[in-house]
Amino acid sequence: QVQLVESGGRLVQAGGSLRLSCVASGRIFSINVMGWYRQAPGKQRELVAGITSGGTTNYGDSVKGRFTISRDNAKNTVYMQMNSLKPGDTGVYYCSAKYWAGSMIRSWGQGTQVTVSS
């Protein structure tokens, strides 16, 4: 299995920046893709950004140009740099990893709260 632990969420003013971190442990050698999702109150969880083991990235339309996902393989950590934050970015941010264990499995972290005040 893959375990994920997020950190870095907090209250920030609009226009500010945050960096979220996600540390993976367990079957890290079998991870295919990692990503960040967020869930705002009363809304469905949505993809924010993803990064493959080869370094290919993709972003949700609402964060393109503002957020950057990266990974440090030596530290088994994925980061997301969030700039020009808006109140609409408020939500619980979850780290996710898809890995192979006989079939493709997705693991989730416990989430970290990001609140952007206007």
Image: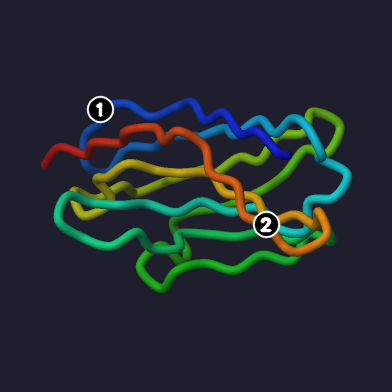
Where is 37 relative to 78, above or below? below
Q: How crowded is mark 2: few (under 14 residues within 10 Å), some or many (20 or more)?
A: some
Q: Where is residue 61 in the image (x, y as percent from the top left)?
A: 41, 73
Instruction: Name the quadrant containing residue 27.
Output: top right
Mark 1 / mark 2, whichever is N-terminal: 1
Q: What residue type is labelled 2?
A: Ile
**Figure quadrant of the N terminus:** top right
Front: mark 1 or 2: 2
Residue 92, given in percent of the width and then of the height, sits at 32, 41
Residue drawn at (67%, 48%), measured in percent from left and top?
Answer: 70
| Residue occupying the far left of the picture | 118
Residue that mark 2 sits on: 105
- Check disc 1 and report its element: helix, strand or loop: strand
Q: Disc 1 marks which residue?
A: 11
Of residue 104 and residue 115, the one placed in the foreground of this image is 104
The x and y percentages for residue 19 are: 49, 34
Q: Identify residue type, mark 1.
A: Leu
| Residue that appears at 15% across and 56% down | 42
Foreground: 115 or 67?
115
Kindly identify the residue that appears in the image at 32 percent across and 37 percent down: 16
Looking at the rendered structure, the secondary structure element under dot 2 is strand
Q: Are marks 1 and 2 in contact (CB under 8 Å)?
A: no
Q: Check the image and name the residue furthest to the front.
A: 102
